[in-house]
Amino acid sequence: MNFFANGWKQPKTTAAGLLIAVASVAGVLAQQGISLGRVGTGTVVSLVSALATAMLGLVAKDPETARQRVSGSARQQRGDSNGAKLGAWMLIALLVPLPWMEGCSAKSVAQNIVNWTPALESAVATVDSTAALLTPGDAPIFAAAANGFDAASNLLVTQARAYLANPTAGALQQLQTQVVTFQQQVSAALLEVAKITNPSSQAHALTVIQDVATIVNSMLSLVASISSKTAVQKMSAETGIKLAMVRPYLDGSRAAELVAAHYGEPMTVARAQVARAELTEMQAGF
């Protein structure tokens, strides 16, 4: 009976636990191909999982906090501890695979890819102006590493918009090829500028190229989400420079800042999304 008593005394924590369990079970069912029927463009399982996660977000944002009911320091500390635990549970839930993404239409994902293009164009423009800010000895190294970013970026943007306008298999294949090509180009640039010995020049060079890398990797994840397993395997086979090779030169906080700003979400959520995307890409062979 203690189980039910504890659940009744701590309804918010209990609800969070149950919602996480529902999302986790739904994720396992989706991975096994169990759909329980379809709802619109998705499945019953994906809908249940999405609703569970959405309600979990509402629970986490519940305005009822320990400060509103605490009268002593001991209870204040206990309330803060419960809040921290709930935050940790929320992070765990965010790291659970998102099966309901499988129900998203190719058009909505393509629109998401296109929505990244202004940020990509801005990041590439920043790269173009960076060489002048580096030391005379480091500028040529940086310029050579980033050479071709403009052409690759323009082609990727053009193909993303073309696929959005006409989402055919041929257009998707071109988008798959170009996003991998550009991602590899950016990864090679990261490895090159990492050789710059001047600490200030190196830090500046890595930061501006990482901004491009974060956006291209985000677009890569989106393209992969609407690609078949065979296509993803082909894409990953074309990557000579793996994410694990450039990961030491990437700043997770900087990547999260870009993602948070783009989607208008908290840094905690963005950090979890960046970590999950990196893990998914590495598991896929990128």
Image (cartoon, grey):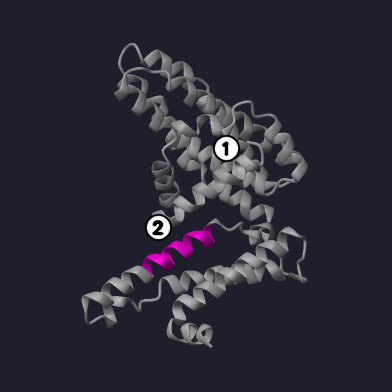
Label 2 vs label 1: CA separation? Answer: 27 Å
Query: Measured along the vertical axis of the image, is residue 53 above or below residue 190?
Result: below
Q: Residue furthest left?
A: 72
Pointer 1 local density, CA inside 10 Å: few below 14, some 14–19, many at least 20 = many
Q: Which mark is residue 129?
A: none
Pointer 2 local density, CA inside 10 Å: few below 14, some 14–19, many at least 20 = few
Residue topped by disc 2: 266
Residue type of the residue flagged with mark 1: Val
Q: Residue furthest top?
A: 137
Query: Measured along the vertical axis of the image, is residue 185 above or below residue 79?
Result: above
Q: Main secondary structure of the magenta part?
A: helix
Query: Measured along the vertical axis of the image, is residue 84 above or below residue 275?
Result: below
Residue type of the residue flagged with mark 2: Pro
Residue drawn at x 44%, y 36% as measured from the top left: 211
Residue 160 shows in the view: no
Residue 229 shows in the view: yes
Whole-percent x and y of residue 121?
A: 47, 36
The image quadrant of residue 10 is bottom left
Residue drawn at x 73%, y 38% as measured from the top left: 233
Residue topped by disc 1: 157
Image depth: mark 2 or mark 1 in front = 2
| Residues rendered magenta in the picture | 83-94
> Tag 1, which secondary structure?
helix
Image quarter (top left, top right, bottom left or bottom right) of the C terminus: top right
The image quadrant of residue 84 is bottom left
Whole-percent x and y of residue 256?
A: 43, 47
Q: Is residue 85 magenta?
A: yes
